[in-house]
Amino acid sequence: MPPSTILPHDTGNVPFPNLWRERLAGCVIEAQAIGASRADVYRVQGGGGRDVFIKREPADDPFGELHDEVARLQWLQTQGMEAAQVLDTHDDANGRWLLMRAVPGRDLASSPDLAPLQVVHLMADALQALHTLPTDRCPFDHRLPHRLAAARARMEAGAVDAEDFDDARAGQTVQQVFAALLASVPAQVDLVVTHGDACLPNLMAAQGRFTGFIDCGRLGVADRHQDLALAARSIASNLGGQWVAPFFARYGTVPDTALLAFYCLLDEFF
């Protein structure tokens, strides 16, 4: 279970938007501490319906992704893809806010009822379905020119934490890693609609079936290895390296190891 904190029922220590306070009255609100998002995330239980989640990021965050996530979740709904449902949004001096309906079940990293083979099959099938969406219908461009420019902007703003690099890059400076990134940019691309942060905690399942994507702020058209790389890394970290090959077998591809390494390197900047 992800760690959480039960907040007072009056939610007085969190500046939730006033227009939501009636809805939150009497609910149990838990601050979620799973994942690497810079946003504050709260699960709201009670209120006579399915649980909801609230996300908040600072109003002055130049690299915030909440508005991006709202647009992408709404677009996924139009494509018939399972994902968190946006209920409301709000911007004020205390931050950017998103209210969304909880996706049923548990994330693939923490579900106690799924065997590793089930997990990798669910992930492979969900990504394969996402990757079949026509790219010409997707308005979100995450091809390399855009992502490299975003990585550079984050580096120059001091928003990349070298202390958080993977073990393979421990001790390197942000500038050294960025130079290595530029030196390994692939010449070819295989464009699909990608999730952008395809790790096990961002896919949900209930009763042995996939129920939806969450944390979709980086969804967009990119090389399929954007998703395959982070999925393989997450599987190895959460389940063990022996489950990476079954994932690729289920997905139906022999991955390019150089591309897997490149997209993990790119992820160091986000």
Image (cartoon, rainbow, N blue to C red):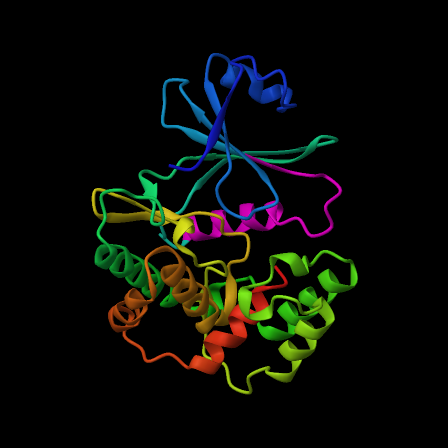
Q: Position of residue 167 (x, y in %)?
A: 54, 65
Q: Is residue 85 left or right of residue 59?
A: left
Q: Is residue 195 left or right of residue 212?
A: right
Which residue is rendered at x = 52% and y = 71% of the image? Answer: 263
The C terminus - image quarter: bottom right
Front position in the image: 109 or 95: 109
Which residue is rendered at x = 59% and y = 82% of the image? Answer: 185
Q: Position of residue 41 (x, y in %)?
A: 54, 35
Q: Position of residue 184 (x, y in %)?
A: 59, 83
| In magenta stretch: residue 83 | no
Q: Position of residue 134 (x, y in %)?
A: 41, 68
Which residue is rendered at x = 62% and y = 24% of the image? Answer: 16
Front position in the image: 10 or 99: 10
What range of the chain is rendered magenta? 55-78
Q: How many marks?
A: 0
* Residue 141 in view of the camera: no
| In magenta stretch: residue 73 | yes
The N terminus - image quarter: top left
Q: Is residue 256 above or below residue 268?
A: below
